[in-house]
Image (tube, grey):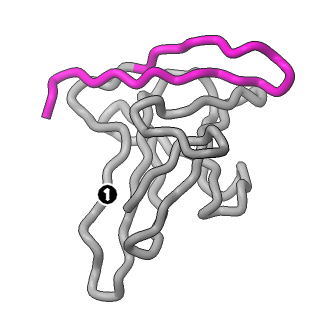
Amino acid sequence: MRSTSELHATLRPPGKLSQPMILVLLGERMIKTTKPSGDGMVKVTFSLPTNQPAGAVSVVGDFNNWDPSAHPLRVRSNQTRSVSVTVPAGSTLRFRYLAEGGMWFDDETIPAGGGGDPLLAV
């Protein structure tokens, strides 16, 4: 594992031009997945630094009907905030992050799909 990984996120509030923002998390990968369980499910954990960006952040995507209240990231003791979702193995997740104030941003380390949102195959 690298000692420093960088996540380039693009803030795209509706109707505004994109603004670049760099998120840095020391010693941690931003998204972790488990191996499929006996029932064929995979746990996907989305993580961000505690203070970047400031305020509340949720992960929203096709796995939660794009509901911003379904998966808010919670502060952890390791200076991160994270949330986990469980999905069937073999799923492809389309997702984005939504920060306080309606600021949308992407994990630029995950390739974008046809609709422009990142796609994560698990």
Q: Which residue is at the front of the view, 116 or 9? A: 116
Q: Quadrant of the N terminus?
A: top left
Q: Which residue is at the front of the view, 9 or 3? A: 9
**Relative height, residue 60 to residue 52 (above, below):** below
Q: Which residue is at the front of the view, 95 or 49? A: 95
In the rendered structure, the answer to whether residue 94 lies left or right of residue 107 reads right
Residue 21 at x, y = what percent? 53, 14
Q: Quadrant of residue 81?
A: top left
Residue 82 at x, y = what percent? 44, 45
Q: In which quarter of the image is residue 104?
A: top right
Q: In which quarter of the image is the C terminus?
A: bottom left
Q: What element carries label 1?
A: strand
Residue of label 1: 33
Q: In which quarter of the image is residue 71?
A: bottom right
Residue depicted at 76% across the width and 13% down the height: 17
Q: Which residue is at the front of the view, 112 or 98? A: 112
Q: Is 81 one of the magenta-colored residues?
A: no
**Relative height, residue 47 to residue 8 (above, below):** below
Count of numbered circles in the view: 1
**Residue, far right:** 15
Residue 93 at x, y = what percent? 52, 57
Residue depicted at 60% across the width and 38% down the height: 97
In the rendered structure, the answer to whether residue 13 lies left or right of residue 90 reads right
Residue depicted at 29% across the width and 74% down the height: 36
Amino acid type, mark 1: Thr
Residue depicted at 71% across the width and 62% down the height: 65
**Relative height, residue 67 to residue 104 (above, below):** below
**Residue, far bottom:** 39
- What's the magenta region? 1-23
